[in-house]
Amino acid sequence: MSATLLGSIARTSVPQVVLRRFLALDSVVTTGNGLAYVAFSTPLGRLLGVGQGLLLGLGLLLVAYGAAVGLLASRGRPPALAVKAVIETNYAWAALSLVSLAVWFTPTLTGTVWIAVQGLAVAGFALLQQLALRSVDE
């Protein structure tokens, strides 16, 4: 994600708007990733070296989670407790993504890179959301 894109998303003096934008971006990326896993679980499974059934299940989970985050982003003032749950879930997903490489999966090189990159991206969303929530609380 480019600094220009992040700068344009965060460019506002209203902390609540920044928080909602980061939640919305998380929702779009997560839902899109989930839809790709559902629609292309077989070829992506081969490319990444991850089982088709696992990708299909993760895809359905990601679509539901992305929709829930999108619903939260649509609220004028997202409840802090719900936002904290999203942040904690994102940090957990990021950690489990990296742990999975060492403990559970033996993906292809492409899969290893993909799992690591998406884990770091999710950690980035969590950090941005955490900082935005902190600004709202001040």
Image (cartoon, rainbow, N blue to C red):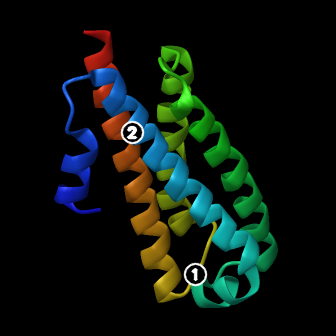
123 up-or-down from 85: above or below:
below
34 relative to 138 in the view: left or right: right
Instruction: Tell me which amino acid carries mark 2.
Output: Arg
> Which residue is outermost to the right?
53
136 up-or-down from 92: above or below:
above
> Which residue is outermost to the top?
138
51 up-or-down from 4: above or below:
below
Say which residue label 1 marks. 107
86 relative to 6 in the view: left or right: right
At 28% from the left and 45% from the top, the residue drawn is 9
Residue 103 image position (x, y, % from top left): 58, 64
Residue 100 image position (x, y, % from top left): 57, 62
Q: Is residue 116 visible?
A: yes
Quarter holding residue 57:
bottom right
Q: Quadrant of the N terminus?
A: bottom left
43 relative to 108 in the view: left or right: right
Secondary element at image label 1? loop
Q: Nearer the viewer, residue 33 or 14?
A: 14
Say which residue label 2 marks. 21
Q: Earlier in the sequence, mark 1 or mark 2?
A: 2
Residue 25 image position (x, y, % from top left): 44, 48
Quarter holding residue 138:
top left
